[in-house]
């Protein structure tokens, strides 16, 4: 019997080693599995954050486009109003009594001078000559103070 016990003891020792090895392998596999799941979770969180950021950017871009369209529309409405007012004024002037009569040169000059003071008429060809070289705003010879602009 002692030989049988020795054999049985040897077999049990080998099974214990195998069981211990399997347990260690299972533990290592479990740790690797948990790490993989965590990596997948972190990757998914990163993708979610990127998608959220893209959604915020897209929302901001859509709002900017909408605002730009509204601003452009307002500008177009103002331009259309300016054109309408200009056409109405032109019609009223051209159809007024005496519209075909020539203006006195002094009256014509005073009217042009008054209109040319507005920035809207600054580039008008009829105003360019009136704006340059006005003695009232040029410096005085000999270092004197310039007269105040009109």
Image (cartoon, rainbow, N blue to C red):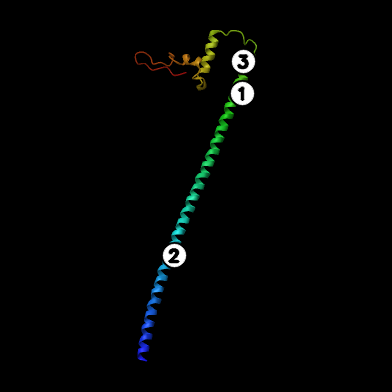
Between disc 1 and disc 3, whose residue precedes? 1
Q: Position of residue 113 (x, y in %)?
A: 51, 15
* Quarter of the figure that contains the N terminus: bottom left
Q: Nearer the viewer, residue 138 or 68?
A: 68
Q: Earlier in the sequence, mark 2 or mark 1?
A: 2
Q: Residues within 10 Å of mark 1 (few under 14, many from 20)?
A: few
Which one is nearer the viewer's eye here, 112 or 24? 24
What's the CA distance linking mark 2 and mark 1?
Answer: 74 Å
What is the x, y in percent for residue 89?
61, 19
Check contact, mark 2 vs mark 3: CB within 8 A.
Answer: no
Instruction: Pick whichever, 115 or 13, lies toward us.
Output: 13
Q: In this rendering, is residue 128 above or below 33?
A: above
Residue designated by label 1: 84
Residue assigned mark 3: 93
Quadrant of res 133: top left
Q: Quadrant of residue 28?
A: bottom left
Look at 54% across and 8% down and name the residue there. Answer: 105
Task: Mark 2: give few (<14), some (14-19) or many (20+) Cα within 10 Å.
Answer: few
**Looking at the picture, how far across and down is residue 39, in whole percent?**
43, 59
Residue at image coords 44%, 65%: 33
Q: Residue at x 41, y 73 (%)?
A: 22
Query: CA gap, disc 1 to disc 3?
Result: 14 Å
Q: Measured along the vertical axis of the image, is residue 56 above or below residue 70? A: below
Mark 2 or 1, closer to the camera: 2
Q: From the viewer's perspective, tell me whether residue 4 is left or right of residue 80.
A: left
Q: Residue 34 got which mark?
A: 2
The local secondary structure at tag 3 comes to helix
Is 109 left or right of 24, judged from the image as shown? right
């Amino acid at each position: 019997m002692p030989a049988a016990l020795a054999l049985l003891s040897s077999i049990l020792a080998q099974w214990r080693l195998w069981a211990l090895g399997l347990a260690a392998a299972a533990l290592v596999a479990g740790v690797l599995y948990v790490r993989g799941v965590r990596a997948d979770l972190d990757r998914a969180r990163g993708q979610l954050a990127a998608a959220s950021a893209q959604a915020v950017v897209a929302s901001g871009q859509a709002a900017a486009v909408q605002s730009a369209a509204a601003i452009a529309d307002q500008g177009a409405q103002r331009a259309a109003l300016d054109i309408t007012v200009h056409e109405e004024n032109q019609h009223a002037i051209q159809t007024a009594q005496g519209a075909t009569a020539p203006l006195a040169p002094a009256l014509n000059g005073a009217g042009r001078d008054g209109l040319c003071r507005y920035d809207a008429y600054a580039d008008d060809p009829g105003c360019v000559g009136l704006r340059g070289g006005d003695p009232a705003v040029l410096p005085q010879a000999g270092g004197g103070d310039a007269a105040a602009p009109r």
